[in-house]
Image (cartoon, grey):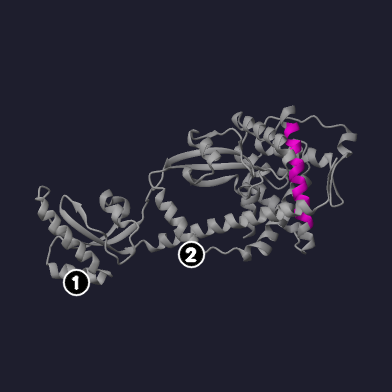
Amino acid sequence: MRTRLFRHLVLMTLVVAGPIVPPAAAQVMRIAAVVNDEAISAFDIDQRVRLVVATSGARPNPELLRRLESQVLNTLIEERLQLQEAKRLNIRVNEAEVDEGIQFIEKQNQFQPGQLERALARSGVDLTTLADQLRAQISWSKLVRQRLRPSVVVGQDEIEEALRRSAESEGQIEVQLSEIFLALDSPERRDETTRVAAELVRQVRGGASFGDLARQVSQASSAQTSGDLGWVSVTRLPEAVERAVRDTQPGSVTDPVVTREGIYVLQVRDRRTGGDLGEARVRLKQVLLPLRPDAPRDAVQTQTALASQIAASIASCEDMDRVIADLKSRDSGDLGSVRLRDVPEQLRRAIENLPVGKASTPVRTEAGIQVLAVCERDTPNNLAQRRAVENTLGQTKLDMMARRYLRDLRRDGLIEIR
């Protein structure tokens, strides 16, 4: 569990940037902010900015550094609040956990022990800067897991609604999306935050790693997975975001998208048409009332009426078996297990959302009038899908609760920016 936590929190590709001009000693010692009597110095900001640049491959021009200072200060304020609240609740992070995180980063980058510290030092970053970041991330993760997660409940009706919406997305455009989210917790920071977002866009378009920047500066929980949101139907996105990503080509990044909650920078990694059925399988039984394609209209109506009566009489696959036996039709019977994607579209529409054991409405095909029943679905995948939906809904609720918790800490805290 702990290794998985570090995998999400701190995977890095260390790109050692050129040297950043060190600030004057007096500037380094200056107090930039005070959070409930705990100071954040200009040195703390300088070190975190260097860490962002070193791990993202961004080009450290004066404009980037100036913009990052504002965002980094905001991040450091939130980390102080998180650490203070964790301490108040007696949630501790021991040095072994932080060391384990550093060792994990070294292994992921195929570094020998101590090589990470030397790589950071070449960019002017002290290892304690990374250790402090890890300590804040781990403590907040523990707090959220212990204090908030037990109150997250996802109802079966919510899962069903999410599955229904997913089924409706068939044929809709879906995008594989990553995000950097900068919160707008105070109106006075709107303009500066917008400028930070614009500079991040410029850096990514210039070759900086979107994922590494997301890990370092994004304020969404997706920062833990490099901003990855997975596949999302564009029709389910907020209107402003939908407009931004709909025409964005794979591999490209949008301009900043301003919403009420904050500012998004979005990367479209890929796109596809929704409703890919993959390898889902169903076991089908059918009743076929044969009709020639050129059968007269009255014959079609008669057979359709009979098929409707048959469908209405079926409440289980055992009922289907009895009807098939009574008809003595060699064209009716058990069709076996088939991939849903291989079923002709006309029939697939009739059965893809059909409950197990229920009969479909009659379907006119070239062979005649068909009534189908789904006797089994691919239960493991279906169960996995429901669990995935439940996890996604639960994580969304948890993220919202955590953001509100942090917003309340900020509102109630004594924060002085100098």
Q: Mark 1 points at which residue?
A: 322
Q: What stretch is highlighted in magenta?
A: 65-84
Q: Mark 2 points at which residue?
A: 156
Residue pictured at 72% horizontal, 41% vertical: 187
The residue under label 1 is which amino acid type? Arg
Q: Nearer the viewer, residue 411 or 209?
A: 411
Quarter of the image for the C terminus: give it.
top right
Residue 71 among those drawn in magenta: yes
Percent of width and height locating residue 147: 68, 64
Residue pictured at 53% horizontal, 35% vertical: 244
For residue 14, side relative to residue 38 (left or right): left
* Secondary structure at numbered mark 2: helix
The residue under label 2 is which amino acid type? Gln
Q: Residues within 10 Å of mark 1 (few under 14, many from 20)?
A: few
Quadrant of res 54: top right
Quarter of the image for the N terminus: give it.
bottom right
Residue 143 image label: none
> Given contact means CB atoms under 8 Å apart, are the residues at marks 1 and 2 in contact?
no
Q: Is residue 399 above or below residue 357?
A: above
